[in-house]
Image (cartoon, rainbow, N blue to C red):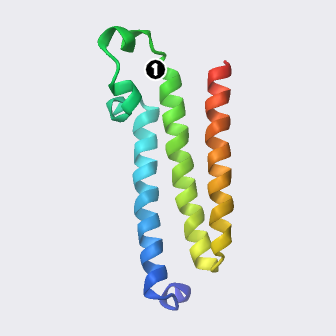
């Protein structure tokens, strides 16, 4: 706990914002994995009723939940980068997040 007291106000604000983002992404990932709140997705919400019946909802649930969980992990990693004062580390986490998302989308579309 003594590390938190030694942080500047700006670092404390960064950590609080990252925690809020992480919680939001984790909750959305959990909701998407259960198939709820699919109407929040812009592409799915724009479909009419006939097209929604033809869409594989399991793939949409998996992709959306993987992306949200990846965002939560990215927020957690940004907290670690803030605590260690390693600002360049967050750039690598963003690159890994993008690669992770594209690999999830490719893997789910391949099956």
Asked if residue 88 is positioned above or below residue 34 in the image, the reply reads below
Name the residue nearer the viewer: 28 or 98: 98
**What residue is rendered at 40% in x and 62% in y?**
20
Q: How far from the left and from the top, in percent, is residue 86?
A: 66, 76
Quadrant in the rendering for residue 19: bottom left
In the rendered image, which residue does mark 1 sit on? 57
Asked if residue 36 is positioned above or below residue 17 in the image, the reply reads above
Image mark count: 1
Asked if residue 20 is positioned above or below residue 16 in the image, the reply reads above
Q: How far from the left and from the top, in percent, is residue 2?
A: 53, 89
Q: How far from the left and from the top, in percent, is residue 22?
A: 46, 57
**What residue is rendered at 63% in x and 47% in y?**
98
Q: Is residue 94 left or right of residue 16?
A: right
**What residue is rendered at 65% in x and 63% in y?**
91
**What residue is rendered at 57% in x and 75% in y?**
82
Quadrant occupied by the C terminus: top right
Dot 1 crowding, Cα within 10 Å, few <14, some 14–19, many 20+: some
Q: Secondary structure at mark 1?
A: helix
Name the residue nearer the viewer: 1 or 67: 67
Q: How far from the left and from the top, in percent, is residue 37?
A: 34, 33
Quadrant in the rendering for residue 47: top left
């Amino acid at each position: 706990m003594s590390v938190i007291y030694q942080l500047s106000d700006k670092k404390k604000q960064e950590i609080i914002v990252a925690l809020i983002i992480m919680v939001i992404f984790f909750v959305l990932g959990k909701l998407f994995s259960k198939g709820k709140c699919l109407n929040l997705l812009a592409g799915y919400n724009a479909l009419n009723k006939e097209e929604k019946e033809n869409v594989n909802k399991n793939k949409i649930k998996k992709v959306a939940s993987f992306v949200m969980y990846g965002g939560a992990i990215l927020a957690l990693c940004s907290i670690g980068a803030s605590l260690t004062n390693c600002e360049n580390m967050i750039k690598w986490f963003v690159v890994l997040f993008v690669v992770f998302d594209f690999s999830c989308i490719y893997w789910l579309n391949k099956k």
